[in-house]
Image: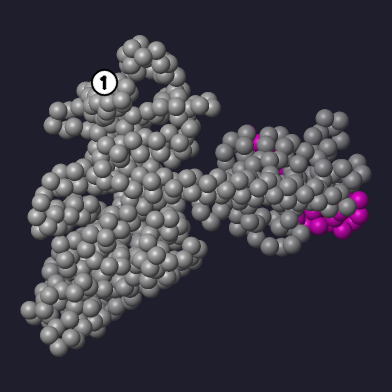
Amino acid sequence: MSPTDPIRLNLFFEALSDADYERVRPLLVRRTWRKGSTILGSDDPHEGLFLIETGRVWVSKRTSVGGETLLSLLHAGDYFGESELLDGRPRMSNAVALDETVTVEVPKPEFERIISASPQAAQRLAQVLSVRLRGLSQHFVRQVERLGEHHAHEIEKLRRLSEASTIVNSTLHLDRLLGIMLDTAREIVDADGGTVYIVDEAKQELWSKVMQGSDLVEIRLPLGRGIAGYVGSTGEPLLIDDAYLDPRFNPEFDTKTGYRTRTILCVPIKNKDDRTIGVLQLLNKHDGVFTTDDLELIRSLSVHGAIALENARLYALERQSIAMEKELNAAHNVQMSLLPQESPRIKGYDIVGRTKPAQWVGGDYFDFIPMNEGRTALCLGDVTGKGLPAALLMANIQAILRSQWMVGPTPRRIMQRTNKLLRQSIQEGKFVTLFYGIIDAERHWMVFTNAGHENPMLVKPDGSVRRLSAGGTVLGILDDLFFEEDVVSLEPGDMVVMFSDGVTEAANAQNQLFGDKRLEAVVVEHRHLGSAAMADAIEHSIHSFAGDEPMRDDVTLLVVRREKS
């Protein structure tokens, strides 16, 4: 044996005599692996024990959500692959060369002979396995602790956001709202000062109202000038640790007042059409600099702020109306402006959404929410009651849902968090039914959950119909709710029809309801039409059935069809 033979010094051969090692050595198989190459993959069959002569090996396990969890990092002198040789089960982890690595493989028969013939070798193997198991146990305990801390942090953020959203939506008075938004934002991130600006598109300016002495005066600055102007013109948030090192910073305010701006957090306030309608700028965090967590909180708050600003601005315009009819008509316009003005353009899909309130304003809601990785959320809901109170609750639901997709990636988690936020502001006895589905246009499936809403219909080209029923109870009644989640594949020609109860509960002069069976018959009969034509056919059938009877409830439809190639 060479005195410099590194394999002789491997942990596995520690208990072998030199004579036994010399007998085994001709049977060993040496291989060189390039950096990043997979030595052993999960489920790969192998017939030997791998000893590391040089280099390092990363052993990991792929999780169900696509990530990799590190199990161990092995160095020269370590070995791997012993578990599969001992229990005969398929390999469950991946072994990847972290550097250029040389391994020496002990064939399975020789491994078994050594373990059987040498109690000392078997004992040493057991010791190594015990050490690794202890290490893994400690590793997973630390992971659980970190996960617990992360969840506690997320819950605290959710609580703070819930409280902030309730406060921001507490007024329709624009001047008061600007102050409430600023005070709320300052409090949740511990900022010293700041300003909420409104975009004046006609003049290409930002404007706001600030206190000068005892007077509330209006200030204006051009879009594109300074930090706020830059964010207003680009729609991109900024997180600045040192204002004076940023060339976009305008020190004019500091020069006039003697104030010293250190750190800045500035986010756009965007409406449902992704148009910047305002800017929220915060200055000088009391303890250090603004963080990405602060940015996430303020961006979520800005979603609620955008809805509140839109409502406040529209209310300020319409409150001049004297006649009740004009006020109701204005409220109808506000509600319709909050709903999508056009359908999403998703390659391979034909999508249509529409609603007709039974009164001037209604409580039905639908929305299309663009997400990451080619996914789009489809929502259709119904709040209790009718008229302006129902419409205001609908607007609150819209704001909550549009802020929640950044926090949780699945319909079930989004529904649970939406219920927690809704419980902070909903009146006793009020509730919301909601269907929430996410379409993946690349994988052609939809994952969904349903909070007590009418079960949508999935109709196949052959006329078969499936009701999408997985979910749970209505929102806003209980604090802690559990929702089931399901996924359906969308094949070419498949159509999903989502609807409110105003469709099935439309009544004729004999007080008969249109009902599920009539709706299903219409859907099956017209299943080969496009989405808009399907919606037209349903509405025509409802009105033909009801005759001259007025609609008792809002009629809302959302139709999705996967186009045939």
Judged left or right of residue 511, residue 98 is right
Residue sitting at the far front:
214
**Percent of width and height locating residue 220:** 22, 24
Task: State the residue lying farthest toward the left.
Answer: 548
Which residue is labeled 1 in the image?
Answer: 225
Which residue in the rendered view is the most extreme toward the bottom?
A: 510
On screen, residue 3 above or below 163: above
Q: 496 or 233, which lies in front? A: 233
Tell me what residue is drawn at x 21 percent, y 83 percent. 513
Dot 1 alpha-carbon crowd within 10 angstroms: few under 14, some 14 to 19, many 20 or more: some
Whether residue 113 is in magenta: the answer is yes
Q: Residue at x 62, y 39 (%)?
A: 97
Picture layout, residue 258 above or below residue 510: above
Q: What is the quadrant of the C terminus in the image?
A: bottom left
Indicate the amino acid at tag 1: Arg
* Residue 246 occupies quadrant: top left
* Left or right, 139 with reference to 340: right
Point out the stretch of residues depicted in magenta.
100-122
Q: Which residue is at 73% across, 47% downward?
A: 138
Looking at the image, is 281 positioned above or below residue 502? above
Which SS does the magenta portion mostly show? Answer: helix
Q: What kind of element bears circle 1? A: loop
